[in-house]
Every structure is written in C-alpha cells, then in structure tokens.
Image: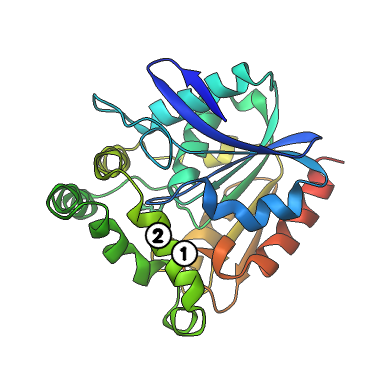
C-alpha cells in the first residue's frame, strides 16, 4: 500500500501482526530484498518493509535529499501507521538510515539489526565514485548501478550456482528509476559519520556480516559491534554483501532468535 508523506507517496509492504519490525533495504534495491525475512517473521510480527523515497515504487524526489530525509520519511510513516515503537533493521544503505533514525528518535526503537553496513562517512575517493555513479546513471540508466553492484552483492560461486537469484535481483535493480538512484548516491556520499553514535546505542543489537563482503568487510563490522554496548556479531560464511538474499536460511536463524529474545 502507499502512504502519503510530506511531498511524496511512499510504498510500504506490511505483513503479519504483532510487535512491529521495520526493515530498510539497501542500494540499488527495494523492499523485495526482504522477501525471505518477511516470510519468516510474518507469523509472529507486523513486518514493515518500505521502499525508500526514489527507490522501488516510491516517488522520486524532485529536489536534493539526504539520509536524514529518508529517516524523516520513516518517522512520518510510523506516525501514520500508528507505530510508537518498533524493532529496526537496516541493510547497508538501510543501515545508514537506521543510524540517522537512532540519532533523531532513539526512544522509538526497541532493538536494532545492522546487516552489512558500516558507520564511517565516505572519504573523498568514495565520494568521487558516487559522483561517477550518478553520471553513469544519467548516461546508462539503472543498469549502471546493476552492473557495478551485482559482482559485489553475491559471491562468484553464488552467481554461478543460483542463476535464478541473479535474474530476479537483476530485474529488481533494472526496475529502479535512475534519478532515484542518483539521489541515493549523493545522499550516501555526504552522509554523516556515525562512529560516535555507536557508544550511545543501548538497545539489543544484532550485527551480521558476510564473510566475503568488500562493501562492509567483517573486520570493520566487528569493530562496529565492539563499540555498541549490547551487540552480538555474526559472520555468514560463503556470503558476500547481500546476506539476507544470498543465504536467507542462515540470516533468518540469527534474526528469528534475536527478535525472540529482544522482544520477549
Ligand atoms: C548498499 O548496499 O546499500 C550500498 O552498497 C551501500 C554503499 O554503497 O555504501
């Protein structure tokens, strides 16, 4: 269903009943990346998977936005949906939005899942790469992001073994509005550093890394988990960046167990 947020319609998938769990997708993806997690959690929770502004079926911004804009959208959405408090999960770019949410409204989140994400802001080189990505998106459309990301999302082995996963993922990435991805690239390029935030996080936190993730490497994520007072750190073997889709079984075992304890 779509919810009207100030200046945009946001698409939100909602399944199940119970304590609310909000899962935020990464780049260049949308709520569909969480399909396996929605299936695993919906028997026990109200699972909410929005498409961030400009991605999936949500409206593309007409003026520039920041990671804070995405976070404000989620807070407005929670108000509209009558959700005072929720468990919050973010994958990669969704993690950057989760950090912004914890800066803005920490009392509204009861637990945190950080999957394949990192707290540091971009350096100059990374910013330049995002600018180049923005130009490629204008030149080649969403395929530019797909071509750049696919080899990072899944290991070579998974790409060989699971052609159906590669195909469905490619379709998701190709379906994005190029300009929505331009906004996302620039918002990520100039996102706030969240390293200092980590020691202020007091809710139970699940940190999940992929053994072969070059975007958010396990050692970086382990260090991040060390700075969060109530965090547990796990590495999914044989997975690259997109752990929720590359090995949903292993991911969901961790997620279900974590939420059972965190929401008990
Ligand atoms: C993502 O998966 O959301 C992006 O790779 C994050 C990033 O580029 O920093």
Residue placed most toward the observer, 121 or 84: 84
Q: Check the picture and name the quadrant holding the C terminus.
A: top right
Above or below, 246 relative to 53: below
Residue 131: tell me if it is visible. Answer: yes
Query: Residue under circle 2?
Result: 171
Question: How is this picture coloured?
Answer: rainbow
x, y percentage for residue 210? 53, 68
Residue placed most toward the observer, 32 or 220: 32
> Which residue is found at the position 47% from the left and 53% from the top?
117
x, y percentage for residue 120? 38, 48
> Which residue is found at the position 78% from the left and 34% from the top?
19
> Which residue is found at the position 76% from the left and 46% from the top?
42
Above or below, 225 relative to 81: below
Q: Do the residues bearing badges 2 and 1 touch, measured as CB atoms within 8 Å?
A: yes
Query: Residue under circle 1?
Result: 168
Check disc 2: other Cα within 10 Å, few if <14, some if 14-19, many if 20+.
Answer: few
Residue 201: tell me if it is visible. Answer: no
Mark 2 CB lies closer than 8 A to ligand 1: no
Q: Residue furthest right?
A: 264
Report whether 203 appears left or right of 103.
right
SS at badge 1: helix
Check disc 1: other Cα within 10 Å, few if <14, some if 14-19, many if 20+.
Answer: few
Report whether 156 appears left or right of 199.
left
SS at badge 2: helix
x, y percentage for residue 221? 51, 59
x, y percentage for residue 167? 43, 69
Mark 1 CB lies closer than 8 A to ligand 1: no
Number of the label disc, if any, that sits on residue 145: none
Above or below, 151 relative to 228: below
Label 2 to label 1: alpha-carbon separation: 5 Å
Residue placed most toward the observer, 194 or 164: 164
């Amino acid at each position: 269903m779509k919810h009207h947020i100030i200046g945009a319609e946001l698409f939100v998938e909602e399944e199940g009943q119970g304590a609310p769990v909000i899962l935020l997708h990464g780049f260049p993806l949308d709520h569909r990346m969480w399909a396996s997690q929605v299936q695993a959690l919906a028997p026990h929770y109200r699972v909410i998977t929005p498409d961030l502004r400009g991605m999936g079926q949500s409206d593309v911004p007409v003026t520039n936005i920041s990671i804070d804009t995405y976070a404000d959208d989620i807070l407005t959405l929670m108000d509209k949906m009558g959700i005072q408090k929720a468990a919050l999960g973010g994958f990669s770019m969704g993690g950057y939005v989760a950090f912004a949410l914890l800066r803005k409204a920490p009392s509204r989140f009861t637990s945190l899942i950080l999957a394949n994400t990192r707290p540091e802001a971009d350096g100059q080189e990374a910013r330049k790469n995002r600018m180049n990505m923005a130009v490629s998106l204008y030149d080649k459309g969403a395929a530019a992001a797909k071509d750049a990301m696919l080899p990072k999302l899944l290991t070579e082995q998974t790409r060989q073994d699971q052609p159906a996963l590669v195909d469905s993922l490619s379709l998701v990435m190709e379906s994005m509005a190029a300009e929505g991805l331009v906004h996302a690239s620039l918002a990520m390029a100039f996102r706030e550093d969240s390293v200092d935030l980590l020691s202020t996080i007091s809710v139970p936190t699940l940190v999940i890394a992929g053994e072969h993730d070059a975007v958010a490497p396990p050692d970086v994520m382990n260090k991040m988990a060390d700075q969060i007072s109530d965090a547990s750190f796990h590495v999914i073997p044989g997975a690259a960046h997109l752990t929720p889709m590359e090995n949903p079984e292993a991911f969901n075992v961790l997620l279900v167990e974590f939420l059972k304890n965190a929401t008990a």
